[in-house]
Amino acid sequence: MKIGIFDSGIGGLTVFREISKRLPSFELIYLGDTARLPYGIKSKKTVNKYSDNNVRFLKSLGCEIIVIACNTASSYSTDLLKRKYKFPIFDVLSAGVAASLESEAKRIGVIGTSSTIESNTYQRTLKKRKKSIKIIAKACPMLVPIIEQGLAKENYSKIIIKNNLALLKKSKVEALILGCTHYPLIKNEIKKFLGPRVTLVDSAEEISKSLFKYLKTNHPKEFTKYKKKRRIYVTDKSSYFERASKKIFKNIEVEIKLVDIK
Amino acid sequence: MKIGIFDSGIGGLTVFREISKRLPSFELIYLGDTARLPYGIKSKKTVNKYSDNNVRFLKSLGCEIIVIACNTASSYSTDLLKRKYKFPIFDVLSAGVAASLESEAKRIGVIGTSSTIESNTYQRTLKKRKKSIKIIAKACPMLVPIIEQGLAKENYSKIIIKNNLALLKKSKVEALILGCTHYPLIKNEIKKFLGPRVTLVDSAEEISKSLFKYLKTNHPKEFTKYKKKRRIYVTDKSSYFERASKKIFKNIEVEIKLVDIK
């Protein structure tokens, strides 16, 4: 059984990595739409079109389960894709929301790119699931650049992290949804600032747990001792991409192949 | 006579604005390829394809002169476009290089996105034009995010600017090429840090001067007292785009229209 994972770029490799660890006997295909990234600053219409292209490509390679490893695509395109394609679709947003509610926190923080926070989807979905919850949402647009540039350890990055998270600390959140696939890469820095009592909800971890559960119930025979193939495709391969992926993923051992999905 | 200007996004509006001021009697059409921005982190092949799409679109609207207001496209695609299309093509990179050499500076600094600096095009072009020149090039990847997010006045942004430009100050550059269309928007902050003796080369200003000179010689009759139309097209219109353009351009009085160029 093949699982297809897509993201606008390489951030979703945090999700790929978690699923890969937890489900060694399932074949994985990752698609990073690097020719058209980032999705976060584009309109719903455009993101829907790109998401559909991505799923069509993964389907053409035989994937029967789709994981949306991109917060913007999760927020904009999940319903559309579920209607159009008949196979199970897992998305980081739903996984993050479910896990934050399971933590039983009464004050939940959400951080993400400007578009994720402004789309209001996390906030709306949380409220729908549990009305009494207090939500503190904060856009952190500078975190992706410092992660992609490998600058998270710089002094000014510490100031940016502090500045971006001050409101959440002040609001005494008990759980914080890391609403962008890049953020797990600076989990330690975030934890250090917010303190050990705040539960950090890492969608990469959560989605791989839900997927595991689903597959255990529906495809138990696929859990074998054999390790299955992993493939990574990107729609554009630039020197920036090579550098950033090396900076943020020290040991992705899978060859990354260029593909034209149109 | 219609002049077509294109950029990957809205940064090129700094160029549009300068040309608009200097050439009121020429019709201007701006195209921002916001659906596929940024170009700076994509491969040459991909950028060439996008640049070609953009010129084809501008040509279809009757443009007879093209201005490449994007540093990445200037660096990757100028030669290709000049071969393919028969009309005059002006690019920010050549304009910046020419102006920095005219300043008679012996030590020239260049700042840009990582891809601009790593492509080595500014450095190579400068060296080719004047061998004795000393070039100090520095990638400043964090400047675009702070400008687009409207964070240039934040305390940490001052630290980032200082940190990014320290090498240039230490190297005692006499002229500095602002090798990214966004940078003119923080010219004052840069000037403040480097001091008044450093000539800042603003490609937006320079390209509008070269264009003026070219048109005065080749199309003198088009200089009339009549103001001609300005149009701005973008390939995607998102809330991020609306916000960022408001943050960085307080008074663009032209309506921005969405267009599908494929």
Image (cartoon, coloured by chain):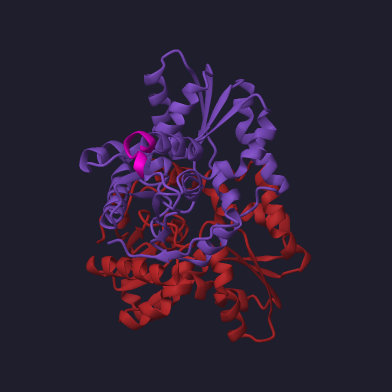
Chain colours: A purple, B red
**Tally of numbered discs:** 0
Viewport quadrant of the C terminus of chain A: bottom left
Which residue is pictured at 71% across the width and 53% down the height? B162
Q: Quadrant of residue B103?
A: bottom right
Question: Residue A96 versus residue A158: which sits nearer the camera?
Answer: A96
Residue A45 counted in the magenta span:
no
Secondary structure, magenta segment, majority class:
helix
Q: Is residue A100 left or right of residue A74?
A: right
Which residue is pictured at 32% across the width and 48% down the height? A51
Instruction: State the image coordinates of residue B32 (x, y, percent, origin top left).
Output: 37, 57
Q: Quadrant of residue B42?
A: bottom left
Which residue is pictured at 67% across the width and 53% down the height? B161
Is B128 located above or below residue A38 in the figure? Answer: below
Instruction: State the image coordinates of residue A224 (x, y, percent, origin top left).
Output: 42, 47
Is B79 located above or below residue B209 in the figure? Answer: below
Instruction: State the image coordinates of residue A117 (x, y, percent, origin top left).
Output: 45, 34
Question: Residue A126 versus residue B143: which sits nearer the camera?
Answer: A126
| Range covered by the magenta-colored residues | A215-221
Question: Outermost residue toward the right?
Answer: B170
Question: Residue B70 versus residue A85: which sits nearer the camera?
Answer: A85
Question: Residue B110 versus residue A47: which sits nearer the camera?
Answer: A47
Residue A219 counted in the magenta span:
yes
Question: Outermost residue toward the top?
Answer: A132
Instruction: State the image coordinates of residue B199 (x, y, percent, origin top left).
Output: 66, 67
Residue A231 appears in the figure = yes
Q: Is residue A3 left or right of residue A12?
A: left
Residue A120 appears in the figure = no
